[in-house]
Image (cartoon, helix red, strand yellow):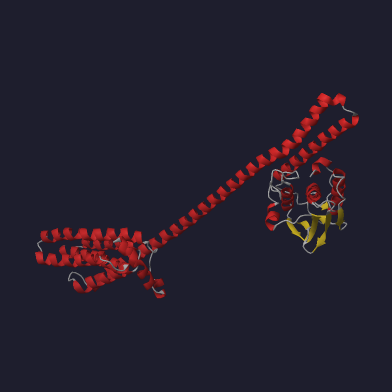
Amino acid sequence: MVRQGRMAEPERMSSSSPRAAWLPRGRELAPSDFAWRHRFVCVLLALHVPVLSVLGLARGYEPLHVLTDMAMIAGFLAIAVAPGPRRTRSCAATAGLLICSSVLVHLYDGLTEMHFHYFVAVAVVALYEDWSPYVLAVGFVLVQHGLVTDVGSWRTALVHAAFVVAESIVLVVFWHANEKAQREKDALQAALFSGQGSVRAQLEQTDRIRTDLIGTVSHEFRTPLTGIRGAALTLLKRGERLDAAGRARLLEAVLEQEERLSRLLENMLTAAQATAADPRAAAEVDAVAAEVVMLAGAARPECPAVTVAVSPGTLARIDRAALHQVLANLVDNAQQHGAPGAIPVVAGGTDADGVWLSVSNEGAPLSEDVARRLFEPFTQADTSATRAREGLGMGLYVVRRLIEVHGGSVALRSQDGWTTVELRLRPAASPVVLAPEPRRAYAV
């Protein structure tokens, strides 16, 4: 019966018309859901046949009379279990139950208590969640009480029909309430699954970042620490045999590696702590750019001087120390990754959209995918273990964090042999004078 119900389902659905959309109905039952509900109603209907037969004979009715009533019920049961459209089968089962109610009332000569069987039958056919069994029930009650039986009248028929209608309305309201609760449940489950997927993705990303952090930090920290240890052991064991120039070179190497560790730690701490900004902060972009370029020239005397073209008096709504570190990171990247002998350019000014600031360098072009990923933590254009340049891949991530915290945006483009990082910041009305920070606080 389940298989037949599923085969008949497309036919039933295709036969429904837009004009019937207003008719009361619950949710569209799945084939398997309809199958077990219809099976329950049919079993209940089949059980009425022996029970009513025994009651009829016990009440003194002729066997032929009882047999006729039972044959009518069995006929509707046969239609209900036979292959066919859902609505035909459900209406046949409904008609069979209503005839059982009529027979029961007749066996007890119209006893009021026996009429409650009608309401039980109507409640049972609610399992179909369809309007047609209720229309059949109302019509059956009107005809049965008004025309066929001699124990009532049209007034009684109307009263019984009104109660059946009221019960039908209550059940329809229940359907809609149940459907609303089901939709809310489905929405909550969907949100839960979405949240689980988001949490799972975040956990996977966190695990990836943790793995990258361990691998990158172990590599980047081990190199300068090895250099410091080697220089210190050389000075300790062979310092007396070295001339002044040799000892000075070793001490400079120690300071250089220490500076490298400081840069790495500074970027990591900034990325972790950059969560809020002072809304009153303002910085003179041209002055900060000039200071960064001067310090960059002193730190990397072997690199060409950086060109600065920032409009005088440009003020941006950003903390001066934060802007210093942003430009220091960008200038250091431009010096490290630019073509040999290329001159990085720092430019800036104001336009209709606010303050703009860019750092450009000539060098190898970057793909759009690489350019997009460079602002993520522990990401570099060259991720191989044998890469020529040092770094944790935190510089551009720190830039993005600091700029976004101050309400700005960052974009990177690579075209015509130039790679440019452009910053957008909000303009500021007046600068806030801050005490100068130590040089190490602005290390790249």
Q: Where residue 170 appears, x then y in whole percent?
A: 36, 63
Q: Is residue 78 above or below residue 338?
A: below
**Residue at image point 80% right, 43% down:** 443
Q: Could you say which is closer to the camera, residue 294 or residue 126? A: 294
Side (left or right) of 412 relative to 249: left
Q: Where residue 242 appears, x then y in whole percent?
A: 87, 27
**Residue at image point 32% right, 67% down:** 86
Residue 430 showing in the rendered view: no
Q: Quadrant of the C terminus?
A: top right
Q: Where residue 147 appears, x then y in whole percent?
A: 21, 74
Residue farthest along the right direction in this orientation: 244
Side (left or right) of 262 relative to 294: left
Q: Quadrant of the N terminus?
A: bottom left
Residue 82 showing in the rendered view: yes
Q: Could you say which is closer to the camera, residue 180 or residue 407? A: 407
Q: Could you say which is closer to the camera, residue 250 or residue 397? A: 250
**Residue at image point 31% right, 58% down:** 36
Q: Where residue 317 appears, x then y in whole percent?
A: 78, 54
